[in-house]
Amino acid sequence: MNETVEYELQHAEDFFKVGRQGVKARADDREKGASIFLRLDDGARVDLIARILDNWLDGEELNHAMVSGALRHAWDSEPYTGGARVGSYVTSAAARLRDAWAFSMDEFIEEWGVSLMSDAEARELKAMAFPLTVYRGGTGTVDEVASGVSWTLDREVASFYANEWPRSWGAKGEPVIVSRSVDENEAFAFLNDRSEAEILIPYADHAENVSILEGAP
């Protein structure tokens, strides 16, 4: 048994227990959750996040701080399978749930969005002057692009996801960039460790309230 697998077997069960109380204990648990996730290979990472999501949907016990640490990295990174990047670890795991039909990305962000942020990101979000103009880029129809929960304060980042990123992996489709205004109560999280100024917005109004900056109407 290699060291990574042994470590997983010893510590993964701690995700599924009530966490310790106290600021330092929660910080340590968050770091522990991130560390376990990062030590795993792609397949084991997806399996872990799927089990976490299954337990969350079933209302089972979870160590919230440990789960938050793992989910942050799962949200920020993508499994590499079949020679291509396939969504994030969260979306890959969601497709493998026992009751995948019951999973909603909007509900996931409503529940876990705040917990994904670092303390510094939470302070930055609180200091922002709302309403904000946010952007989202992708390929497909305007409604498909506008329906996502991940937006950005930086139009250049949206342009990258509309144009460069799809071409890198051979994706085809009409590049689309949309923008919208977001109020404080709509912005559930701000994530910036990849310098993408990401704003998470569940339950967006989709195409009805967006401006089309690039792509076919």
Image (cartoon, rainbow, N blue to C red):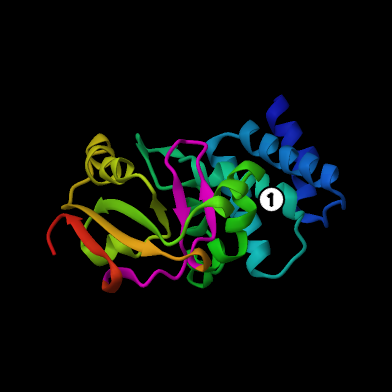
Q: Position of residue 212 (x, y in %)?
A: 20, 60
For the C terminus, the quadrant is bottom left
Number of residues whose C-alpha sits closer than 10 Å to that of mark 1, classed few (under 14), some (14–19) or many (20 or more): many
Residue under the image location 26 percent in, 57 percent down:
178
- Asked if residue 104 shows in the view, the reply is no
Question: Is residue 115 or residue 84 the one in the foreground?
Answer: 115
Residue under the image location 86 percent in, 51 percent down:
20
Q: Position of residue 27 (x, y in %)?
A: 77, 42
Q: Position of residue 107 (x, y in %)?
A: 54, 68
- Asked if residue 124 shows in the view, the reply is yes
- Farthest residue to the right: give it: 21
Q: Position of residue 77 (x, y in %)?
A: 49, 40
Q: Quadrant of residue 60?
A: bottom right
Give yes or no for residue 175 being in the magenta stretch. no
Residue under the image location 25 percent in, 46 percent down:
162
Which stretch did the figure color magenta?
A: 186-207
- Farthest residue to the left: give it: 216
80 lies above or below 147 = above
Residue at which label 1 appears: 67
The type of residue carrying mark 1 is Val
Question: Is residue 127 or residue 96 the one in the foreground?
Answer: 127
In the shown orientation, is residue 53 left or right of residue 15? left
- Farthest residue to the top: give it: 2
Question: Is residue 51 or residue 105 the one in the foreground?
Answer: 105
Asked which secondary structure carries label 1, the reply is helix
Q: How many marks?
A: 1
Question: Is residue 168 or residue 65 the one in the foreground?
Answer: 65
In the shown orientation, is residue 30 left or right of residue 208? right
For the N terminus, the quadrant is top right
Residue under the image location 21 percent in, 58 percent down:
140
